[in-house]
Image (tube, rainbow, N blue to C red):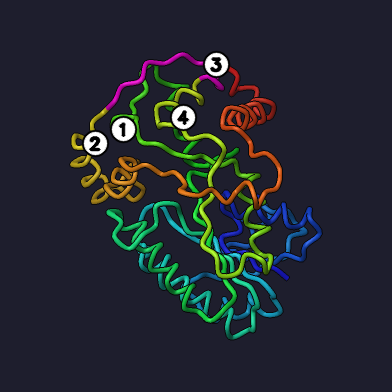
């Protein structure tokens, strides 16, 4: 039995479907059973719980051999700080795994995670990694670059701006480099990281292409069939507004932490994805076309 936390999220829902297709017995940790049925289907085995609730985690981990821990946040919210979710949440999941004699623990961290990171997001991911490494469990840590696919928040937001505006604002110089990985490749990496051969490894995960932010936005516009003017907005100009967004808005469009990360390269020193996936990785141009061709097929209005 594999317990997947964060199972109704973008990566988690795709992973649950992959594992079930592979014939694995899967239990999804979810906070809302009705939402889980909509996203995962009525036949998915679920356990209602939260990373802040140790008792619910212990119930969810009962009988599990492996835990794949995906829960994370990209921006803090009321009652959900980076420390609460990334660090204390991971501690709680690890404690439940030990209590229920879970054998393997796979943790999804993030590329750029390091102890001296400038962003609190990456700092707390590092703290969580350290808890995993010291857990006494058989562990594997994956650090993906930008994961994209149908329904991911980053691509959806960019696509909405590209569709609606003839001039697309790009935060920063647009020169920061990323190694976007298609969600099907990411879920393959997570599934195969459960193998004992990968125990004790921290693995960087990226796609086959290294692209600047400008190139990513251009490829999305091309996939949508739009020609757009890109306007670069210097990050120092945006930072004061981001601070105000964080104070006054429950879900700010951008945070200071995110601006910090946008100014950094996010590429692999050594990409483990090719060896984990075992087949050629999906190029960004092909993957992003899949995303929008699938969306167009389901929604005639999106072709307008």
What is the quadrant of residue 282 in the picture?
top right
Residue 255 falls within the magenta-colored stretch: no
Q: Position of residue 280 (x, y in %)?
A: 68, 39
Q: Visible in this render: residue 81?
A: no
Res 235 label: 2
Q: What are the residue bounds of the magenta stretch? A: 222-232
**N-term-proximal mark, 3 vs 2:** 3
Quick one: label 1 or label 4, which is nearer the N terminus? 1
Q: Are marks 4 and 2 in contact (CB under 8 Å)?
A: no
> Where is mark 4, residue-wise?
216
Mark 3 in CB contact with mark 2 (< 8 angstroms) = no
Callouts 2 and 1 close, C-beta under 8 Å: yes
Q: CA distance from mark 1 to mark 4?
A: 13 Å
Check the image and report above or below for 107 versus 101. Answer: above
Frontmost residue, 242 versus 281: 281
Rendered residue at 69%/65% (across/down)? 195
Of all residues shown, which one is farthest toward the front?
270
Q: Secondary structure at mark 4?
A: helix
Q: Counting other residues with Cα less than 10 Å from the Cα at mark 3, is it few (<14), some (14-19), or many (20 or more)?
A: few
Of label 2 and label 1, which has the lower sequence position?
Answer: 1
Residue assigned mark 3: 225
Nearest to viewer (mark 1 / mark 4): 4
Q: Which residue is mark 1?
A: 171
Mark 2, secondary structure of its residue: helix
Q: Earlier in the sequence, mark 3 or mark 4?
A: 4
Res. 24 visible in picture: yes
Identify which residue, 295 or 135, lies in the foreground: 135
- Name the image quarter holding the C terminus: top right
Above or below — where is 50 with respect to 212? below
How far apart in space, not on screen, are marks 1 and 3 (Cα)? 22 Å
Q: Residues within 10 Å of mark 1 (few under 14, many from 20)?
A: some
Residue drawn at (36%, 57%) of the image: 122
């Amino acid at each position: 039995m594999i317990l997947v936390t964060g199972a109704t999220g973008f990566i988690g829902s795709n992973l649950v479907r992959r594992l079930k297709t592979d014939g694995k017995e899967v239990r999804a940790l979810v906070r809302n059973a009705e939402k889980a049925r909509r996203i995962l289907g009525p036949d998915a085995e679920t356990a209602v719980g939260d990373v802040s609730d140790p008792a619910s985690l212990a119930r969810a981990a009962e009988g599990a051999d492996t835990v794949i821990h995906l829960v994370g946040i990209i921006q803090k919210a009321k009652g959900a700080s980076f420390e609460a979710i990334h660090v204390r949440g991971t501690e709680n999941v690890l404690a439940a795994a030990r209590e229920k004699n879970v054998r393997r623990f796979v943790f999804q961290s993030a590329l750029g995670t390091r102890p001296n990171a400038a962003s609190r997001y990456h700092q707390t991911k590092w703290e969580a990694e350290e808890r995993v490494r010291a857990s006494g469990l058989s562990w594997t840590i994956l650090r993906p670059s930008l994961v994209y696919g149908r329904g991911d928040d980053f691509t959806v937001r960019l696509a909405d701006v590209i569709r609606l505006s003839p001039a697309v604002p790009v935060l920063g110089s647009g020169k920061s480099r990323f190694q976007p990985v298609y969600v099907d490749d990411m879920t393959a990496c997570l599934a195969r990281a459960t193998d004992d051969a990968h125990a004790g490894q921290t693995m960087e995960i990226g796609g086959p292409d290294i692209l600047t932010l400008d190139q990513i936005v251009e490829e999305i516009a091309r996939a949508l069939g739009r020609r757009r003017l890109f306007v670069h907005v210097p990050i120092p100009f945006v930072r004061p507004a981001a601070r105000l967004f964080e104070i006054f808005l429950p879900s700010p469009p951008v945070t200071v932490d995110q601006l910090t990360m946008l100014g950094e390269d996010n590429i692999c020193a050594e990409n483990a994805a090719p060896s984990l996936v075992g087949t050629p990785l999906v190029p960004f141009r092909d993957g992003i076309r899949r995303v929008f061709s699938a969306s167009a097929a389901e929604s005639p209005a999106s072709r307008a």
